[in-house]
Image (cartoon, grey):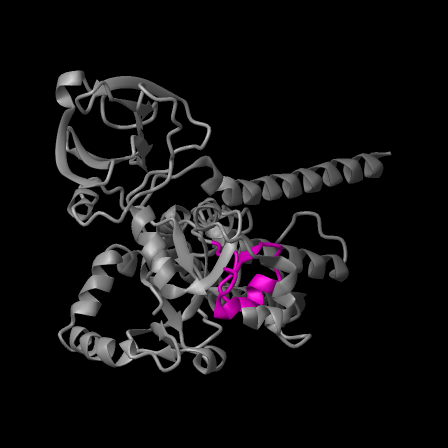
Amino acid sequence: MSGVTLSNDAARNAAVDFSEPLYMDTQVISYKRPVLEADIAGFIKPYDTLMWILLAASMLVVLVAIFGVHVKENSLLFRRNNEVIKETPKLDSERKDPQQQKWESVWYSFQWTIGSTLAQSIPWVPRGSAVRVIAGLWLFSALIIASVYRSNLKAMLILPKLRLPFDSMEELVETDIPCNVPKGSMLYQAVLYAPPGSLLSRLKDQLVDSADADKGVQNLVLGVNAIFIGKSIIEFVAHHTFSQSNVPVSASYQTFQYPVLLGGTNCNVSIYSGAPTPIPRSSQVVPIVMSRSSRGNQLRYLVLLRWYQLQYLALLRDMKCISRSFQGYQLQCLAPLRDMKCNTSFFSGIPTARPLLQIAVTRTCPLYIASQTFFGATSLGLGFKKGSPLKAKVNPILRNLKEFGILDYLVRRETLYAKECLKQESLVGSAETLRPLKLKDFYGVFSLYAAGTFLASVVFLTELILRRKRRT
């Protein structure tokens, strides 16, 4: 029988017999969680698109209304002292002709409409009852609009922007991000034999078929490539990377030696310079031999190092070290009596390590899952040789484990943090957390002020040039 679960499809079902379905799994696309960015366009977000359109339409209506009423009042004829006099509200002491009056009416109507909205002082005072009513109503409306805008502006500037590189298979194939699909998987075969023109066929150009699991996980966390795989595997990876801090690969370490076991074996604890915990003294590192098993001439030791409130595991196997980088600290054990190289792989198969690894948690989620899946759910089960008698013996055991909820408990224990970390709500919620303002948050407002200053400078220089030409 197979030692791992397999996805049940038609091709595999024809080659092997499957056990009782253990659980259902979906095929998802995962990638490095993007970093929150400052939203340069935050100054336009106090109102949505519809509100801005309505505001622009209202300004246009008020502009036309002030201009139309003002021009109409200028054309009214009044009889005063038995003479026909055109009653004209003075806009300028030097009036030349009726055409000049219309252009001045347009300019002052535009200036009053825009200036009131921007809370700027206007030199022209509306004259005439009708014009004053329209201008007064617009002045009151502009006060409300500007007050609501200013009150929401700070909140929109603080709110960061979260830009996902992709959120579906369609968006992924439009990017140049490589996608890792494990060899031998059902998805790998589906991509290889996908019909031309399909989404999976377009994914071939970005396909990465690395068989190194450790390197694949490392490249996924670093954002080198995306991955197309079962959701249960992504949850397992997210769970084990959830409690690790982001330590640079080329970071500098300080090394200190501490005795671990009798016989001259020392443990070198390499400390990352940016680690939050102070450098320990020798008396604060207590070695405890937790278990020892002998198989022939091979000895296996499980050593627990208690360091402040952080606890580390190191496995000495055949006098070779399997160490782990955890919470910014790299634990490395050396055997000076023999010329042996130390591995830097991750060991997570010890049941006693489970509660110890939950102590130091940074609450960081390095991955996210695209909300749109490509394949539907598939059942996972154990594979047996065709006609194997083990299937009849294993199926009742698996059935009992499922009915008593033991399988669900084991899966949830292995993905304790991933269930909450990979939720779409947590991805959106991370963008809604409060944070201090940065200079980049004001780039949008600064650009608006710069554009206004540039426009005012152009108008001012144009007026100077025109005035000099009139004098000459």
* Labels in figure, total: 0
Specify the quadrant of the image occupied by residue 311. top left
**Residue 408 relative to residue 112: left or right:** left
Quadrant of the snapshot with the N terminus: bottom left
In the image, is residue 79 part of the stretch drawn in magenta?
no
Q: Could you tell me residue 97's position as x and y percent?
A: 77, 58
Q: Identify whether 335 is placed above or below 55.
A: above
| Residue at 17%, 34% in the rendered image | 304
Q: Position of residue 360 (x, y in %)?
A: 21, 39
Quick one: quadrant of the C terminus?
A: top right
Is 445 in front, or is 456?
445
Q: Is residue 229 above or below residue 430?
A: below
Residue sitting nearer the eye, 323 or 65 = 323
Q: Position of residue 463 (x, y in %)?
A: 73, 40
Q: Does residue 48 lie above or below 155 as drawn?
A: below
Q: At which x and y percent is residue 179?
A: 55, 57
Res 340 visible: yes
